[in-house]
Image (cartoon, rainbow, N blue to C red):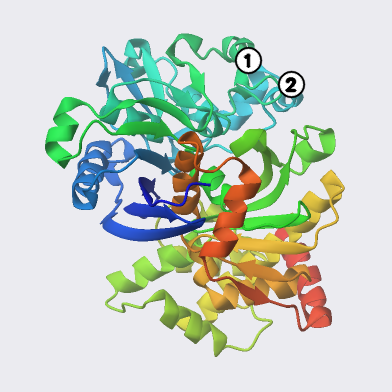
Amino acid sequence: MPSGTTTYLAVDLGAESGRVFRARLNGGRLSLEEVHRFPNVPVRLPDGLYWDALHLLQEVERGLAAAGGNPASIGVDSWAVDFGLLAGGRLLSSPRHYRDPYTDGTVEEACRRVPKEEIYRTTGIQFLQINTLCQLLALEGSPLMEAAETLLMIPDLMNYWLCGETACEETNASTTQLYDSSKRSWARGLMERLGIPGRIFPDLVPPATTLGRLLPHVREETGLGEVPVVAVASHDTASAVAAVPAETESFAYVSSGTWSLVGVELPSPVMSEEAMEANFTNEGGFGGRVRFLKNVMGLWLLQECRREWARRGKVYSYEELCHLAEEVPPGGALVDPDDPLFLTPGDMTGRIERFCAKSGQKPPEGVGEVCRCILESLALKQALVIEEAAGITGRDLEVVHVVGGGSQNELLCRMTAEASGLPVVSGPVEATAAGNALVQAYAAGEVESLARMREVIARSFGLRLYEPQEPERWHALKERFVKIANRR
């Protein structure tokens, strides 16, 4: 590994905010500096919920300008499943938001056209109405689909606007439910049977592919030179998992943020009937690895409650909310974070009350009780998914790595250790940006393998260990949670 300092710019677009980081690799250590942060606020129009993609591009360019210097390359990652449609190189419409209910009923429609088992045997992707497959079915017959010539996932769209190259990076493509997980190519036969036009899907590229260099007008806007744009592991979870500081393969991970992505890392997909019935997903990872996981509704419930309280004039930091939750005795009301009731924005405290009433529980009262309910429920759900993943794959797990923003939540990390009965190692917080940068370093020849990337992470960031302390109490709590979740 070279001993000089190399700078990479990592653009991380999340569902709540976007950030641009200056990452420096020097002597086998990585440092991250956030140079620009901006909100990512969806726009509600009469016909639904949209992302403001042009605003995101403008803020990305501002961040690149703020970073300045002479970076070796730039990489962009984002959330999965959402996309832009282009014709003649122009964006036809702002991308729809995956939480828009316009996809209601599309899972059933997909399985009517192609048997569920066939879809899963091909793609290995869990059935969710937010999936790209379902969104495209919802747009069937629209003028938008008739005009579309190219589909680009969100990071691919940003890359196109930065360097002019159209390609779909594999880790994000793998989330669409239109990607053949075994062949590692577009599932064009499946597309045809579903009535989805295969012509709009561009070539696939693996992570660490250099796409091109900044376009002249982008160089003018940012003050940067002809900097290469690298397709990193562009699904943010793929970058985050690449930055898990694991020492062995016997680990589970939780990429914790708006969503909790909970699972294990495998050399090849598991597309058994058991995996399908448990609704696990096989997504692409860096280095040809597979992320066998479930999407769990993560801190979204807490984020929505916090927004609701702010609208009522009560503004709380996440630290304050966790402190209030700690003051509440354990064993109160529990909810299933993945109940469809909680998918869309708005009135989250009211929905929690409705879930509790439906499941025969006394609803939580006050901010502290609501927060305790959410965090305890999330920890229990994460623990159950970890157990399922271990059982289906035959993995003997030794540790759970929690990365991402949720790794700062000490209470949630502690609860996850208790609920899973496994030690939890938390950190790094900015795992996605770190993984993004290290994939760029791999493309530049500075880091030679995934194992070495993980060594760099372990050497570079402070990690914290949480050991389970009350296994009996949490075992009883888990049994109660299973009954409540199965009652919906």
- Are dots 2 and 1 in contact, CB under 8 Å? yes
Determine whether the residue tagged by mark 2 lies in a helix, strand or loop.
Answer: helix
Residue beneath disc 2 = 118
Circle 1 sits on which residue? Answer: 190
- First along the sequence among labels 2 and 1: 2
State how far apart marks 2 and 1 are (Cα): 9 Å
Image coordinates for residue 171, horizontal then vertical, percent: 55, 34
Residue 34, given in percent of the width and then of the height, sits at: 32, 59
Q: Nearer the viewer, residue 201 or 303?
A: 201
Q: Residues within 10 Å of mark 1 (few under 14, many from 20)?
A: many
Identify the secondary structure beneath mark 1.
Answer: helix
Q: Residue 51, relative to residue 411: is it above or below?
A: above
Outermost residue toward the front in this view: 3
The residue at the point 48 percent across, 56 percent down is: 27
The amino acid type, in three-letter code, at marker 2 is Glu
Is 436 left or right of 57, judged from the image as shown?
Answer: right
| Residue 338 visible in the picture | no
Q: Amino acid at mark 1?
A: Leu
